[in-house]
Amino acid sequence: MRSIFRDFTYDYFSILSYPKEKWGDFWAAYREKHPRVLEEYMFKNNLDDRTLSGEIEKLERREIDRLSHYWESHGPIEKGRVLKNLGKISSQLHLEREDFVIHILGALGKQEHLIVPTSKGNVVMIDLLHCWSEGNIKDFSAVAMRALEDFIEYSEMNVRISMSLEEKVQRFDRLLKYIEMSTKECGFDEKMTIISKLLDKYVDYYNWTGFYLSDGDNSLILGPYVGEPTEHVRIGFGSGICGQAAETKSVFLIPDVSQETNYLSCSARTKSEIVLPLIVDERVIGELDIDSHFQNSFDDLDREFLEKTCRLLIES
């Protein structure tokens, strides 16, 4: 079996060699070693450099030290179990494609695992600190299997910008059905949260995904989202792309935001954007806003899929 399972926790446990007041410096060095994975981890948990410092401050040296000692003695056993179970499901994972690796890392304890698309394939990242905090570390093999089951599902539904038209149509149809099933018994607010997470997770080029809600006074208020934190928590109708979409009740599909004179920049990474107003009884109650780190990301397929997604939300 090719080497798809790697333990990088030794990088993480070097935090113990730093005084607590220098843990921000540790994280900067840590990110240099695992830039793509830790950047995605921050985005998925709505963190930027400003809010990150508060999360680092919450980490406890005693718990990380205890985790380090536990993993030193029990890690080899747990990893052996994972490798044994990998062999049992190798046919489902299509190991011959070499399109993913599993990385064990430590992070902030925010989530058990994360699937990160990269230019060389997908990284299935497992946060050992979360496993420790939640008491799952004694059955680490089950944690790894959950992550792999999630990856199998992801690989069947993931939409990439490089896909053929036919593939994207099939994947969008599959994803729409999954969104409908996942939100069927949910209220409006919960649906927004779930939709934001699912769109962000399954469409590679949706790099900031969230909702704004109308306050009834010609302003939009930031709602649930996944991505880098934004300073635009309130936007007036007519201001920026989001405000224009709300004012005109029209979908705005922007292939290159740098060409827009009325664009409100949320991130230097954003290159294109699509905004879809949520309209009930001819009144704008909010909108779905998606940014991409690539120009010309959105086309009519995205628009049609997202319009159907919005209908699932407002027609409940």
Image (cartoon, helix red, strand yellow):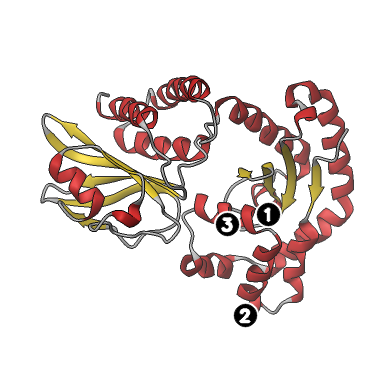
Give me the disc on residue 21: 2
Give me the disc on residue 292: none
Q: Quadrant of the N terminus?
A: top right
Give me the disc on residue 39: 3
Distance between the alpha carbons at the discs numbered 1 and 3: 17 Å
Q: Quadrant of the C terminus?
A: top left
The three-letter code of the residue at mark 2 reads Glu
Residue 153 placement (x, y as % from top left): 61, 26
Seen at 18% across and 44% down, the residue is 246
| Secondary-structure class at tag 1 | helix
Residue in front for this viewpoint, 301 or 267? 301
Residue 114 placement (x, y as % from top left): 61, 44
| Secondary-structure class at tag 2 | helix
Q: Which callout, 1 or 2, points at the residue further toward the start of the chain?
A: 2
Residue 108 placement (x, y as % from top left): 61, 58
Q: Residues within 10 Å of mark 2 (few under 14, many from 20)?
A: few
Q: Which callout, 2 or 3, points at the residue further toward the start of the chain?
A: 2
Q: Residues within 10 Å of mark 3 (few under 14, many from 20)?
A: some
Distance between the alpha carbons at the discs numbered 2 and 3: 22 Å
Residue 67 placement (x, y as % from top left): 76, 58
> From what the image shows, is residue 167 above or below residue 143?
above
The three-letter code of the residue at mark 1 reads Leu
Seen at 68% across and 46% down, the residue is 125
Which residue reaches farthest front?
Answer: 259
Seen at 74% across and 41% down, the residue is 101
Residue hosting label 1: 129
Residue in front for this viewpoint, 47 or 133? 47
The three-letter code of the residue at mark 3 reads Glu
| Secondary-structure class at tag 3 | helix
